[in-house]
Amino acid sequence: KAGVTQTPRYLIKTRGQQVTLSCSPISGHRSVSWYQQTPGQGLQFLFEYFSETQRNKGNFPGRFSGRQFSNSRSEMNVSTLELGDSALYLCASSTPQKVQGFFSGANVLTFGAGSRLTVL
Amino acid sequence: AQKITQTQPGMFVQEKEAVTLDCTYDTSDPSYGLFWYKQPSSGEMIFLIYQGSYDQQNATEGRYSLNFQKARKSANLVISASQLGDSAMYFCAMREGKRSYTGTASKLTFGTGTRLQVTL
């Protein structure tokens, strides 16, 4: 069973450019979430998607956006890149289960290997 | 607001010995979930173990066990019989406590991590 696939694995951009990162979840997983990891801020939640809809968003500026396609694949985009956007961007997929109308808190995220972005 | 604290930036353990990685958390919500992830140098986050706030017993997964002390708000990871391959960063994380009709419970708050080095 293939894991979560993120592309590209490494990329270098310059300030002001934009970047698009792709994430293919595990087959059958319908939820995709994105995290940013930096040495200074650690791991921070960006957003999550389920059934092509953004369900939750972290505290990031509007330059960070994402979307999910009907096959559950997801992309995130960062526009007008800043030096501080240099980070490892991790994507995670899961199969959230509903329990009594709520999504279960025992939802285990499976992460990809990440896309390492360097902004010069 | 939720908070996860990992006070050990780095730990050393000899091969075949047991090691405990500390994690304390802070939340006012009675319903929450606690996770431990391992991150090798490759960057991928690997799920190790999960503990729900209402679980009566401490979670165990092979060589991993979670020492859950609810009153102290601690969720320490115990690795028994350490192996060289256990050398990695270890992150404690907490699931947002409130059940959500729309969110898929994919938002985790992570600690700063502990770097474990297993020596011969």
Image (spheres, rainbow, N blue to C red):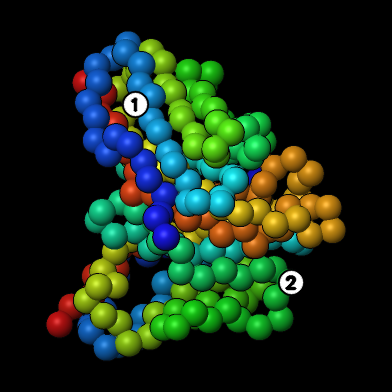
**Of the pair B77 and B72, the residue shown nearer to us:** B77
| Whether residue B18 is situated above or below residue A44 in the rendered picture | below
What amino acid is labelled 2 in the image?
A: Tyr
Task: Identify the image quadrant of the C terminus of chain B.
Answer: bottom left
What amino acid is labelled 1 in the image?
A: Gly
Give the crowd class for mark 1: few <14, some 14-19, many >=20 residues within 10 Å.
Answer: few
Q: Is residue B38 left or right of residue B84?
A: right
Between marks 2 and 1 in the image, the one whose residue lies nearer the viewer: 2
Q: Which mark is residue A50?
A: none
Instruction: Find disc 1 in the rendering and name its residue.
Output: A84
Residue B113 appears anywhere in the view: no
Q: CA distance from mark 2 to mark 1?
A: 39 Å
- Disc 1: host chain: A
Q: Is residue B88 left or right of residue B62?
A: left
**Of the pair A52 and B59, the residue shown nearer to us:** A52
Q: Which mark is residue B54?
A: 2
**Of the pair B55 and A51, the residue shown nearer to us:** A51
- Disc 2: host chain: B
| Whether residue A93 is situated above or below residue B72 in the rendered picture | above
Q: Secondary structure at mark 2?
A: loop
Looking at the picture, how far across and down is residue A65, in whole percent? 51, 23
Q: Work out whether disc 2 and disc 1 sit on a shared chain.
A: no
Looking at the picture, how far across and down is residue A120, in whole percent? 21, 21
Q: Determine the residue located farthest toward the left in the rendered image.
A: B120
Looking at the picture, how far across and down is residue A8, in whole percent? 29, 34
Instruction: Name the image quarter holding residue B26.
Output: bottom right
Q: Residue at x 54, y 38 (%)?
A: A71
Q: Secondary structure at mark 1?
A: helix
Q: Residue at x 30, y 51 (%)?
A: B43
